[in-house]
Image (cartoon, rainbow, N blue to C red):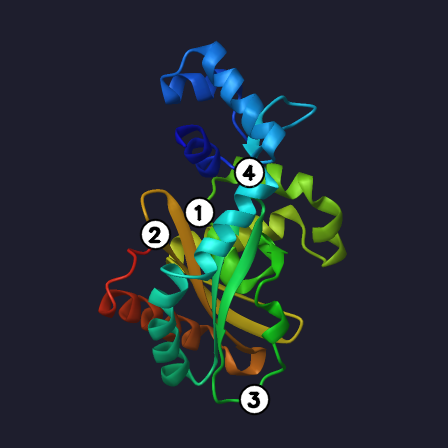
Amino acid sequence: MDLLRLLSVEQAGGMALRDLVAHSGLDRTTAYRMLSVLVSAGYARRDAVSGAYCLGLESMGMGLVALAQAPLTQICVPVMKALARRSDEHTFLVVRSGDYSHCLHLEEGSRPIRSYADYVGGARLLGLGIPSFALLAQWDDDRIGAHFERHRRQYLAKDLSLSKLLRWVRQARTQGYTQVSGQGVGGVGVAFAVGASGTAALGIVAPANRMPRSRGAELAQAIDEELRRFQIGPRR
């Protein structure tokens, strides 16, 4: 379990065997044997080029099933309902899994917007979703650069360069929340702590003409207030 926990913290780039040995306190032979078992069962994987270990699909699947049920989604639904009432806009809950975000829940607002119901349960690159961008902004610039290189084709297809991503990320760090817009929609995202090492994000999304910068600050404050009121967080 300790090895899986370490891999979950450093999922994007993975961890070398020597680092896992140093952080776990296991000897090298024992750590290698345990990792080999995890790899064969699909709970971990070893990168063929770098040799680094990452979480496998079985671990990710189990984590997503757990998060989609109690306690995270159930805890956050009252917050999301309150935000949907306050804003009249759609509110999303997302978590990070490696280079991607997974949408766990959508609370619909009363104002008209195209349907996002099919987003629930889906995955998107961290830089391609409004709430998930708040998760990307938690990384340092070097890690974001490596992430971009892994997915350069997908980002460039959306007319997103590394310089543009970093500009938005630095703006988010300064503001304490994410506000981005594109393809006719805009919104804000706020990341918050989940347990000892996890992070999730809440986002409010609306047509771009309903999301000026001044409203973004107001909605980010509303997210903060509701997270505190329901004793969830703190903000990352």
Q: Earlier in the sequence, mark 2 or mark 3?
A: 3
Marks 2,3: beta carbons within 8 A: no
Q: Quadrant of residue 115?
A: bottom right
Q: Which residue is mark 4?
A: 12
Q: Secondary structure at mark 4?
A: loop
As measured in the structure, the alpha-carbon distance from the residue carrying label 2 to the one carrying label 3 is 31 Å
* Residue 12 drawn at (x, y percent): 55, 38
Q: Earlier in the sequence, mark 1 or mark 2?
A: 1
Quarter of the picture containing the N terminus is: top left
- The residue at the point 34 percent across, 74 percent down is 78
- Report the disc number at residue 112: 3
Q: Earlier in the sequence, mark 4 or mark 3?
A: 4
Q: Is residue 41 above or below residue 176?
A: above
As measured in the structure, the alpha-carbon distance from the residue carrying label 4 to the one carrying label 3 is 36 Å
**Residue type marked 2:** Ala
Q: Secondary structure at mark 3?
A: loop
Q: Earlier in the sequence, mark 4 or mark 2?
A: 4
